[in-house]
Each structure stands twice: as C-alpha cells, then as structure tokens.
Image (tube, grey):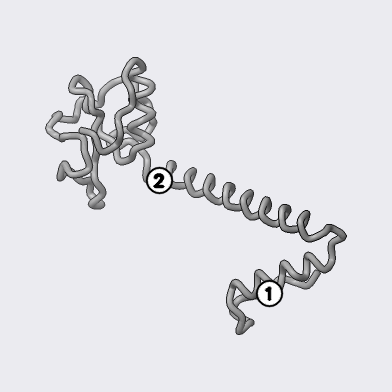
Amino acid sequence: MSSPISLSSSNKSLTDLIRDALVDVYNNCPAGWHEFECATLSAIAGMSTEIAKATAAMEEDTDMMDVNDNDDDDDDDDGDDDGSSSGCGGSGHHDENGRPIYRCPFADCRKPYKGMRTRARHIMNKHPNQPVPAFNDP
C-alpha cells in the first residue's frame, strides 16, 4: 500500500483520495469484490459508531452537566430553583452562555438542567415510577 496522502499536497478531492486508497487496498488484497465491499462498509460503519460514541462522550462531559450541580449527585434538590420555569425549551431561562435551561417536569422537583440526557437520567433515578416525557413537554 502507498503512504498516507495529505489533502494539502494534492489537487484531488477527498472523495477521489478515498477512492484511490480503496482501489489500492482492493488491488493488494486476495478478497473478491463482494467480500471487499462488505469489509469496507463494515469498517466505515465501525468508524462512524466510534466517532459518534466519542462525540457523545465529549458532549456529555461538557454540555450535559447539571446547571447547579457539578458532581452529578442528585440525592437532594439544590434548593436554589424557584420553580418558575415551564420546563420547555421556550421558557426564556438561559445560562450565562445563552444556552436554555430546562427543568424536571414534576412540580414537586423542578430541578434545572442544560441537557436532555441529564434530565432523563434524573427522572429515571429520582422518579422511577414516572415515564420520561418527551423533552419538549413542559
């Protein structure tokens, strides 16, 4: 196989570079076309899954943290929410970066969150007998 090609050192498009690399791999492997095609699609699907997981993990670590809770300890209410938010994205409540703040939909709780995953996790852990409502439900 040839050495890796830099996009900046070539006039070719990314699609052409990928095609050329695949042709090179195909020409140097004993597999037939069908086996090669299946292996290529499987490799691309695997890469896509790995990238999606890594991206989701990074988003979970940065954007999906509790608004008033950095340790993910949902045992007690922080006591700093006034329950005035409707809990939907159009509530008009935003953090210091302009991102919307959402709240647990149950009136006796109203815990604030920045993201759907944190809110869903809270509802499953702290309100186990309640269904997790759609994120746009108040």
Q: Is residue 55 left or right of residue 3?
A: left
Q: What x and y, as percent, mark residue 116?
A: 34, 38
Snapshot quadrant of residue 90: top left
- Indicate which disc, 1 or 2, sits on the residue closer to the N terminus: 1
| Outermost residue toward the front in this view | 34
Residue 28 relative to residue 18: left or right:
right
Residue at 37 percent across and 45 percent down: it is 63
Judged from the image, the secondary structure of the residue bearing numbered disc 2 is helix
Vertical side of 126 occupied by 29: above or below: below
Up/down of 25 relative to 88, above or below: below
Residue 103, horizontal then vertical, whole percent:
23, 33
Answer with the quarter of the image where residue 66 lies. Answer: top left
- Residue placed at 53% from the left, 45% from the top? 53
Residue 97 in picture, x, y percent from top left:
25, 52
* Disc marking residue 37: none
The quarter of the displayed image where residue 117 is located? top left
**Label 2 CA crowd tier, 10 Å (few <14, some 14–19, many 20+):** few
According to the image, label 2 marks what residue? Answer: 62
Q: Residue furthest right?
A: 30
- Please identify the quadrant where the C terminus is shown: top left
State which quarter of the image contains the N terminus: bottom right
Indicate the secondary structure of the residue bearing disc 1.
loop
Which residue is under mark 1?
Answer: 5
Residue positioned 72% across, 58% down in the render: 37
Place of residue 83 in the rendered image (x, y in percent of width and height, measured from the top left): 15, 29
Up-down relation of residue 16 to residue 44 (above or below): below
Residue at the image point whose x is 37% and y is 41% from the top: 64
Tag 2: amino acid:
Thr
Type of amino acid at the residue the image marks with label 1: Ile
